[in-house]
Image: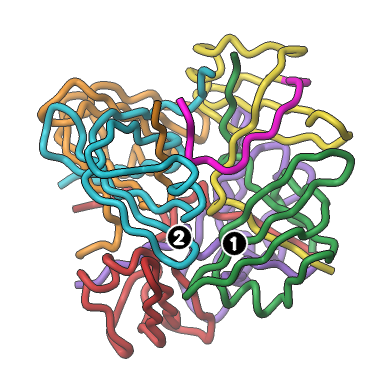
Chain colours: A yellow, B green, C cyan, D orange, E red, F purple
Amino acid sequence: MRLSTRNQLTGIIVEVDLGAVMATVRVQLDGGDQVVTSAITKEAAEDLGLEVGQAATVLVKSTDVSIGVE
Amino acid sequence: MRLSTRNQLTGIIVEVDLGAVMATVRVQLDGGDQVVTSAITKEAAEDLGLEVGQAATVLVKSTDVSIGVE
Amino acid sequence: MRLSTRNQLTGIIVEVDLGAVMATVRVQLDGGDQVVTSAITKEAAEDLGLEVGQAATVLVKSTDVSIGVE
Amino acid sequence: MRLSTRNQLTGIIVEVDLGAVMATVRVQLDGGDQVVTSAITKEAAEDLGLEVGQAATVLVKSTDVSIGVE
Amino acid sequence: MRLSTRNQLTGIIVEVDLGAVMATVRVQLDGGDQVVTSAITKEAAEDLGLEVGQAATVLVKSTDVSIGVE
Amino acid sequence: MRLSTRNQLTGIIVEVDLGAVMATVRVQLDGGDQVVTSAITKEAAEDLGLEVGQAATVLVKSTDVSIGVE
């Protein structure tokens, strides 16, 4: 399936933390040291079988991206 | 100001496109070839004086990040 | 790619409206009369070649869904 | 109150899962088999007294809806 | 309809700006000088008949609120 | 850093509730009785050292603000 979602950044999962109904997942982006944190439902994390070391894509809709400048 | 926003990725603005009331901005992330697209209000883009070549930070709240795996 | 996005509803595109930098797309859900409106970047709508009559999936992250009751 | 929120889909609550500070709620949409998952604060779920079998509306802002096509 | 949406702040509309497919609306909150900007679809703004001077409620889901501290 | 985020409302933290991986924070806005609830990651709440009585800014992107009218 091709998605309208503009931002699809590839990386490797470096942390999965399962909570009560939510989970946080950290992905280190390819080609750099930058890490992205995602908060998804625990059910989604379990359904996908997310594990540290696994390749993953982080997806962000453009309307959810803010900009900062000095 | 320190922000709760977990994802603050640095880069360089490579495109600014002003629409009627919205604008899209593209930022190439440091240390890689990945580009992030942001859709913000035109007013915000003008207030910040965003220009191609300018250093910028893209900010994304963790709850707005989805994960995909093969 | 399998996605963490919990809500993936299938339907048919019934309207595409291209603006200056944004676009709105309406999808009639299968098995009912309910219609979903999406606001995405114009670039995304054009990249996907969205057209009326085309099958499409609407995707919504669980954290973006509110609940109302009488 | 009339809302700007374009997407207001009606259905029946089929699951309520209370976590520590968040909760997930699943609503089966009328006129079909499609189910929508919502992640809201536990406080909201308790304030509304959400229960399985109750009629409910799921609300999604258009800017939070992505599109996928084959 | 009672909503799970935690943040429902009342005020007066002070600006409506219709774009191509989107619109921006500014609401001055009651009991203070703080103004909130909303970006919604043009269709929503027209359907609601939004006008300067009209009482309005701004609604924000808790998962869309970030926190900053000095 | 100057932000594209249009809505930056100042207030005082009146409640911090840490969950498993998420946290909720309530901020009473200056110049009024209105309170805003935020759901952020527990990690963010701890990193910022959020405490009751502390001055804070709530930040909301314009695309995350809906409008209601009677």
Task: Tell me the number on the disc at residue B32.
Answer: none
Please name the residue shown 75% across and 40% down the image.
B34
Name the main secondary structure of what is drawn in magenta: strand
Q: Position of residue D30 (x, y in %)?
A: 13, 31
Amino acid at the residue labelled 1: Thr
Magenta stretch in the rendered image: A1-15
Q: Is residue D57 visible?
A: no
F13, A30: nearer the viewer: A30
D7 lies above or below A33: below
Q: Residue furthest bottom?
A: E53
The residue that disc 2 covers is C22
Q: Is residue E43 magenta?
A: no
Q: Is residue A39 visible?
A: yes
Which quarter of the picture shows residue D3? Answer: bottom left
D18, D65: nearer the viewer: D65
Specify the subunit that label 2 lies on: C
Which quarter of the picture shows residue E14? Answer: bottom left
Which quarter of the picture shows residue E26? Answer: bottom left
| Element marked by disc 2 | strand
D27 lies above or below C47: above
Gap between marks 1 and 2, in whole Å?
9 Å
The residue that disc 1 covers is B24
From the image, which quarter does the N terminus of chain F lie in?
bottom right
